[in-house]
Amino acid sequence: MIKEAKYRQSPEFVLDGVVPWGRRLGEYRAFFALDDLADIGPVLDAGGGPSSFAAEAARLGLQVVAADPIYDFSGEVIAARFEATAVAMREGMRRAAYRFNWRYYGSEEAIHKLRREALSLFLADFEAGKKEGRYITAALPRLPFIDGTFKLALSSHFLFLYGDALDFDFHVAAMWELLRVAEEVRVFPLFNLDGRPSSHLPGVMRVLAAQGAHCALQEVPFEFQKGARRMLSVRR
Ligand SMILES: C[S@@+](CC[C@H](N)C(=O)[O-])C[C@H]1O[C@@H](n2cnc3c(N)ncnc32)[C@H](O)[C@@H]1O
């Protein structure tokens, strides 16, 4: 359902598909308003990529499973794809600097430092984590988990952000699949890569609500794309 491998979703970013670019647990806490980690589990990180959320959560004794098609590849291959992404991100972020709020990160260098920290923590955990079932190779809109496996499913920087590459039907199917395996689904951000609110969001919320799901837009203590201050929370 990805229209083409190399596509331009914004005037500034030229990315090679949905790229492996991972965030740290502290960032996830802000995106998803996860104030109290004590009893959040079990959690699914859908499209977890090279984020260190699952690795850091495991160290804290939390039950987090990350699912992503890239887990089919070795750590070396993922690291190489990360390096290619870093070049494109650096160029894109410089061109698009005016449309970000820099209060949280401070600078583009600080972001790159965080992404490398996340990659290192992820890679250090990847092989052992795979054996322990923490990293599962899977691609939305189909997940290899039984109904209600998770209390919470998170989608960070995948759904809606890549809304030009992933069509409306994909988003609806992915949200139903996440709601099948988890009691609650949270998604952030709700903007496209080009910095505009996702055009899929109102329709996706309408379809979910029409079939009985409870959708809410919640303000979060994080803003990077200017104006992107809300996450979507959906419950069955
Ligand atoms: C930009 S990264 C975000 C990683 C992580 N969620 C974070 O915010 O740090 C997007 C991830 O989505 C993954 N992805 C691509 N297609 C997917 C699919 N159909 N289902 C699940 N994940 C997918 C990519 O492999 C990539 O790791």
Image: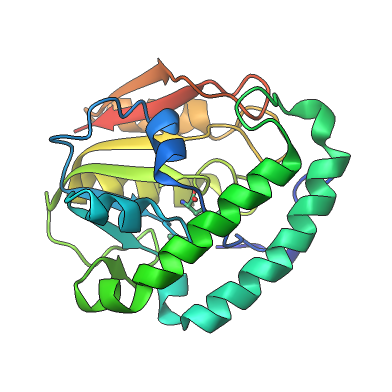
Q: How many marks?
A: 0
In the picture, measured across the screen, residue 11 lies left or right of residue 59, that is right
| Residue name at image x 73 percent, y 35 percent | 107
| Residue name at image x 16 percent, y 44 percent | 41
- Residue 122 position (above or below residue 160): below
Give the x, y percent position of residue 235: 22, 30
Q: Would you say residue 185 is visible in this rendering? A: yes
* Nearer-the-camera pick, 169 or 88: 88
- Residue 157 position (above or below residue 123): above
* Nearer-the-camera pick, 208 or 118: 118
In the picture, measured across the screen, residue 82 lies left or right of residue 9, that is left
In the picture, measured across the screen, residue 71 lies left or right of residue 95, that is left
Q: Which colour scheme is used?
A: rainbow
Q: In which quarter of the image is the N terminus?
A: bottom right
| Residue name at image x 18 percent, y 63 percent | 145
Give the x, y percent position of residue 109: 73, 45
Give the x, y percent position of residue 234: 29, 30
- Looking at the image, which residue sits at the far top? 219
In the picture, measured across the screen, residue 210 lies left or right of residue 115, that is left
Q: Quadrant of the C terminus?
A: top left
| Residue name at image x 78 percent, y 43 percent | 93
* Nearer-the-camera pick, 157 or 221: 221
Q: Quadrant of residue 138?
A: bottom left
Q: Would you say residue 14 is visible in this rendering? A: no
- Residue 223 position (above or below residue 94): above
